[in-house]
Image (cartoon, rainbow, N blue to C red):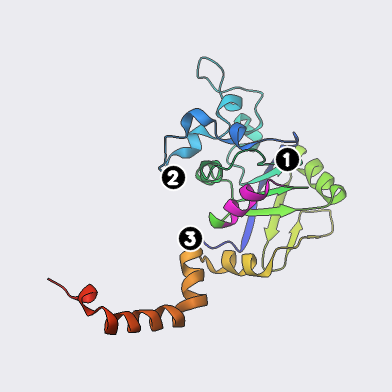
Amino acid sequence: MDRFERLISRAAPMPNADIDTDIIFPARFLLITEKVGLGRYAFYDWRYDSDGSAAPEFVLNQPAYAGAKILICGDNFGCGSSREQAPWALRDLGVSCLISTSFGEIFRANCFKNAMLPIVLPPEPWAELLRLASAGAELEVDLTTGTISSPGIAPIPFDIDPARREALLEGWDEIALALRKDADHIAAFEQRQRLAQPWLYERD
């Protein structure tokens, strides 16, 4: 998994509340399970008109926010049904950080698993960042210091669970975390199993 330490990018304002996973990744595309290329389907019904052309009013289609890696999201972002393709599509689109006042619980957990940083802020600092994003400002998100900064404002602190923070900083996925936590237990089990069931370890 990619490491997340520090990110500098324009932030795209997306303040609508209750943007659910079906808006992020429409259900009709769920049969697509490959992560690579899913970004083309992110916000599909908002990004494209009925003829398949880019919808000019959608924020990520506007030149000022092209390639934005940070989204300033409305309350309860990522609510609705659980689908891994939602964070996969955002990650493939280039998004690495989402900032909101709240997220869907499962969606937020899936973001961490895909090297994306979902930050929860109180309404006041969130509104300040939304104002900056709407003005086209660039934000710096620093996970090492736990701050969000931009010229002209005091750094805004944010909290992340220490285990999640360490995993993002080190680029550890769930397998790497399990090996770090239970490596001794796994090795002991394999040693016992080799003695009790040696045929499992025989090679042709």
Q: Amino acid at mark 2?
A: Lys
Q: Is residue 193 left or right of residue 106?
A: left
**Which residue is located at x 70 percent, y 56 percent?**
140
Would you say the magenta stretch is mainly helix, strand or loop? helix
Q: Amino acid at mark 1?
A: Gly
Among the two numbered marks 3 and 2 on one chain, the one whose residue lies closer to the N terminus: 3
Q: Judging from the image, what secondary structure is the residue with disc 3 in?
A: loop
Q: Amino acid at mark 3?
A: Met
**Which residue is located at x 32 percent, y 79 percent?**
193
Q: Is residue 37 left or right of residue 82?
A: left
Quarter of the rendering containing residue 148: bottom right
Compared with 9, 32 (above or below) is: above
Q: Quadrant of the C terminus?
A: bottom left
The residue stretch that appears in magenta? 103-112
**Residue projecting furthest to the front:** 196
Position of residue 61 measured from the top left corner of the image (x, y, whole percent)? 60, 30
Position of residue 92 measured from the top left corner of the image (x, y, whole percent)? 50, 44
Q: In this figure, which residue is indicated by the disc labeled 3?
A: 1
Among the two numbered marks 1 and 2 on one chain, the one whose residue lies closer to the N terminus: 2
Among the two numbered marks 3 and 1 on one chain, the one whose residue lies closer to the N terminus: 3
**Which residue is located at x 85 percent, y 47 percent?**
123
Q: Which mark, by number, is residue 35?
A: 2
Nearer to us of marks 3 and 1 is 3
Q: In this figure, which residue is indicated by the disc labeled 1?
A: 136
Position of residue 112 measured from the top left corner of the image (x, y, whole percent)? 59, 56
Query: Crowding at label 1, few (<14), some or many (≥20) Cα neighbours within 10 Å?
Result: some
Q: Which mark, by number, is residue 120?
A: none
**Residue projecting furthest to the left:** 204
